Amino acid sequence: MNTASRTPLLEVRDLVVGYGKAAVVHGASFDVRAGEFVTLLGRNGAGKSTTLHAISSLIPKRGGSVRFDGADLTGASAREVVRAGVIQVLEGHRVFHALTVEDNLLVGTYVRASRGDRSKLDRIYDLVPEMAAKRHEPAARLSGGQQQILAVAQGVIGEPKLLILDEPSGGLAPIVIDRILQVAADLCRDGMAILLVEQIVEKALRHAHRCYLMDTGRIVGEGPANEMLGSKALHDAYLGKSAG
């Protein structure tokens, strides 16, 4: 199943992140290899989304390092991170409602180029044909699930080496969640690395190669995804070591 390279594409080491005086992430370290699907799991407030935002330079880091494809991105701007090949799809269906589906996709091509590139549209429509059928409609007319699929497609069209998905399932029907995670798995099989934060544990582990567990801003466990479901480490990360 896993055809990922053994060499890390993303290397996060001793990452420290906080808001105001409060530290949220305390020395987190983990890797994502090229062509690998990795999920970062943990209860609400564990620091998962904060970790993703720090990798993408959407919030500042207080300590540690982030390397990607051999380059040091610790002090890079968000634009520099994107141009290096890391694109994050933020939580919450963030698309441009007044633009058509196709124009939303073309906006996605600007992230790593100076102008829109229509040549990339056919690949996206093959990947998510439901967007092809809606290409001329304003994004505001899409359902919440369709908007989330569009948000993912908008990230993919930028051709990242690593696609980061932050809780894509939020508020969506199970069939839509399955569709989004299947698209991510298909992209991974084609060689794109995926880093996923997701609250629906079973669905995340079904598609991932490896899993890291986070609790109170620290990595507290890791292992093959197919061995993690039902494990004591997963139980402890969500319920605490004294639970049960």
Image: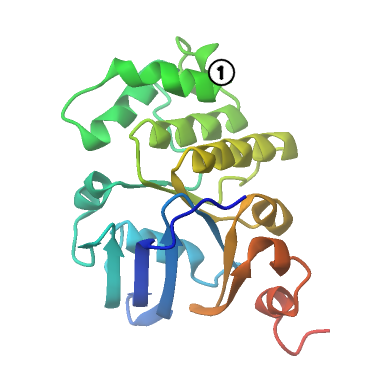
Which residue is the site of mark 1?
A: 129
Render colour scheme: rainbow
Q: Residue at x 23, y 67 (%)?
A: 74
At numbered mark 1, what does the secondary structure look like: helix, strand or loop?
helix
The quadrant in which the C terminus is found is bottom right
Residue 176: give x, y in percent of width and height: 67, 34
Residue closest to the far left: 114
Q: Is residue 99 visible?
A: no
Label 1: few (<14), some (14–19) or many (≥20) C-alpha neighbours in 10 Å: few
Q: Residue at x 60, y 67 (%)?
A: 44
Q: Residue at x 75, y 90 (%)?
A: 242
State which quadrant residue 178 falls in: top right
Q: Is residue 167 visible?
A: yes
Q: Is 11 placed left or right of 148 in the picture?
A: left
Which one is nearer the viewer's eye here, 117 or 143?
117
Which one is nearer the viewer's eye here, 113 or 43?
113
Q: Is 20 placed left or right of 190 in the picture?
A: left
Which one is nearer the viewer's eye here, 47 or 67?
67
Q: Is 177 placed left or right of 197 in the picture?
A: right
Which amino acid type corresponds to the residue marked 1 in the rendered image?
Pro
Badge count = 1
Residue 235: give x, y in percent of width and height: 74, 76
Residue 59: give x, y in percent of width and height: 30, 62
Q: Residue at x 37, y 30 (%)?
A: 157
State which quadrant residue 169 falls in: top right
Residue 177: give x, y in percent of width and height: 66, 40
- In the displayed structure, would residue 119 be above or below residue 4? above
